[in-house]
Image (spheres, rainbow, N blue to C red):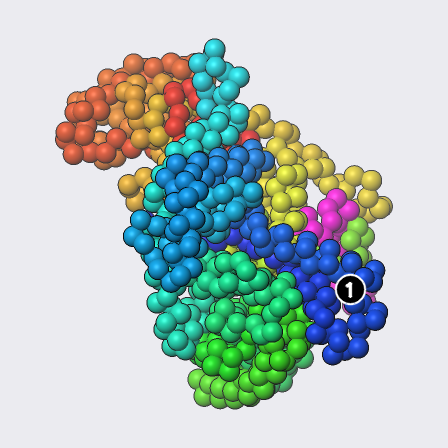
Amino acid sequence: MKDQIFATLQRVGRAFMLPIAILPVAGLFLGIGGSFTNETMLTNFGLMEAMGPGTIPNDILQVMNAAGGIIFGNLPIIFAIAVALAMARQNKAVAALSGAIAFFVMHASIGAMLAIRYPGDARTQCETAQAAGQNPAECLPSGSFANVVGIDSLQMGVFGGIIVGLGVAALHNRYHNIKLPEVLSFFGGERFVPIISSIVFLVVGIAMAFAWPVVQIGINALGALVLGSGYAGTFIYGIIERALIPFGLHHVFYLPFWQTSVGGVMEVCGQQVQGAQNIFFAQLGCADTTAFSSEATRFMAGKFPFMIFGLPGAALAMYQMASPAKRKVAGSLLLSAALTAILTGITEPLEFTFLFVAPLLYIIHCLLAGLSFMLMHLLNVGVGMTFSGGLIDLTLFGILQGNDRTNWLMIPLVGIVYFFVYYLLFRVLISKLNLKTPGRDDTDEVKLYSRSDVDAKTGRNTSHGSSSAAGGGGTATATKTRTDVDEDTLLAAAVVKGLGGLDNLTDVDNCITRLRVSVKDGSLVDDSLLKSTGASGVMKSGKGVQVIYGPRVTAVATAVHSYMENPVDVDVDDEDVAEIEAAAPGGATAAGAGAAAGAATADAAPARVATIVRSPLAGEVIELSEVEDAAFGGGLVGPGVGIRPTSNTVVAPCDATVALIFPTKHAVGLKTDSGVELLIHIGLDTVKLDGVPFEAHVETGQIVEEGTPLVTFDPEAIEAAGYKLTTPVIVTNSAAVGQPIIVASTQVQAGDGLFVIR
């Protein structure tokens, strides 16, 4: 359960990254547009004549300001679409469209209910009373109403979008391949998703008209508690935000503070705005802003001192503590990581450098981060950000806005102190405790890899497609030719193999620093191989895997996605990385065709016919890890799925030969003509029932066609005896035939597609 929750939260955090990724662009538009259309700033810098109202530059900047504002103003629907898109397993475009439709339906339903419950006169009376400082019991809390994409609705913020996105994704994953009766078949499959989403969220909208005001009262109370906690609350917030970085859950944590009333509510230019980041950018776009609220930026400004100054101090300490022989290599890598942190605020390359080898340093780092947030709050620093606290955001949202409005000069003053604190603490602790930071371990390699290190580890070189021999002394060295693949394909093949092979992957995505992967079997993940591809660390919890690459992760993810779509056979030199197995059975490529003279030529492997395995039962399909048995659930018997049956007859899932019927008739072994060996195990531990609730209809050696009844069982008798009906369907020789690719929906009928083996 713990692993399942972690994997789900990881996917939710990954889903949040899609809309968050647009914020830097929106922030750039607002930062430049808002700064250079502010008449006070233009006057101070003597730019009124060149860029003041009525000039062409001012007109362009006004457009930029509006373009940035519209993104921040419509984040709820952006989240609804993006979360549905990211959480859907297949047909993502349908999920995205359904997310938008459901969002409109939900808010239209809320608006209609509000018009019924609070007609115009009653609402006006409430607003008049609240403006006078009163809050009648029959009225909704102040600020409850909002205009959402033109619909008069409740102020749900991004929570409304997230609720829609998660709900639509769940409906999509369950119903995207539903089969309806023939007369209604046109509305089946993916067409059913927007239909069921509209129906469900019409009901949700009606319910939210009654429930959300109560929820909003709770959220406002939580926000008041957080804001009332003062500097201590800011300190705790900073510690938790950094502590969640290794788990990839920090986005889930900080988003409510940035985007909902948990982070505060403020009136800006006559409009009620909720959420720390929303407040900052609303103030940025408001010409009347004389100073940015540090009560809002308390959840953001604390990143600047330790990202721009503190962590580079730690990098300098780690460089100086490296052994002399490795200092040059460690220095180049640490310098690159430090510059990344300074400019962009992407700190994971540095943080994960010492997290895995010296956790004590990371604990100290979390405490210093919390202190940094508290100090910025204490010093009334009003600098906001888009997603990270680097020099770019500091320049746009601090320096350009002026010290009078942001008090940004406190950041470098505190930052310089932070540089020396990090430097001295890291240097002393590394020395006294002999911590194995880069360049201090007993191996020949430094753990933070450069591009050339990746090339060396994956067998890549600059002379692809050629052979070389070194003469002299009778020694010759052959270089493997690479005319059949490019560098990205080779890297992707190594990453995929490190993740357990193509068929072990269920979902691959990335945020700004890490590859986020859901796998079928976490035990197949090879940490050392992944690190040889340039990863600075690997985090695993159940089926959730995070591979930390730093800023170059986007290029890695692109290469992996391309490889997954067009898998090929790739070999890597055995001296550095174990030979990469064929990612897709039957996908081998003739190597060396048309290569230069002397290049080795390989014959193309014969294609294997895909084996389609259909469900032997009607019921609910669950992941193998959810099967309540250590051997099956842990994948020790082989990969596959579990079925919680709603029918009582097991039928042949494909044309096959009955390899074995157990004497107790509780399990059947099958073998297909393509060599796939299957095991269908009816219930768990049911061998102890000695065959009483089972009736076999076939015998060993019998050839059966798809759909042939194999075994009938009595589900009531099995459950009455205290055994679970969960039925694993397993591929017992996956090492020879390949991993099954799951194609089933959550609910299946006997004969529906279950998985495919290519």
Q: Residue 154's x, y, as percent?
A: 44, 47
Q: Residue at the location (42% across, 59% down)? A: 131
Q: How many marks?
A: 1
* Quarter of the figure with the C terminus: top right
- The local secondary structure at tag 1 comes to loop
Whether residue 546 appears in magenta in the rendering, the answer is no
Q: Which residue is mark 1?
A: 53
Q: Residue 58's x, y, as percent?
A: 78, 62
Quarter where residue 591 is shown: top right
Q: Residue at the location (45% across, 53% down)? A: 10
Nearer to us in this view, 269 or 692: 269
Residue 558 lies left or right of residue 118; in this view the side is: right
Q: Residue at the location (28% across, 28% down)? A: 682
**As drawn, 340 above or below 687:** below
Q: Residue 297's x, y, as percent?
A: 52, 70
User: What residue type is disc 1 on?
Assistant: Pro
Query: Of all residues shown, which one is farthest toward the top?
Result: 183
Q: Residues within 10 Å of mark 1 (few under 14, many from 20)?
A: some
Report whether residue 146 is seen.
yes
Q: Residue at the location (42% across, 19% down)? A: 751
Q: Residue 448's x, y, as percent?
A: 59, 69
**As drawn, 183 above or below 756:** above
- Residue range corresponding to the magenta coloring: 470-491
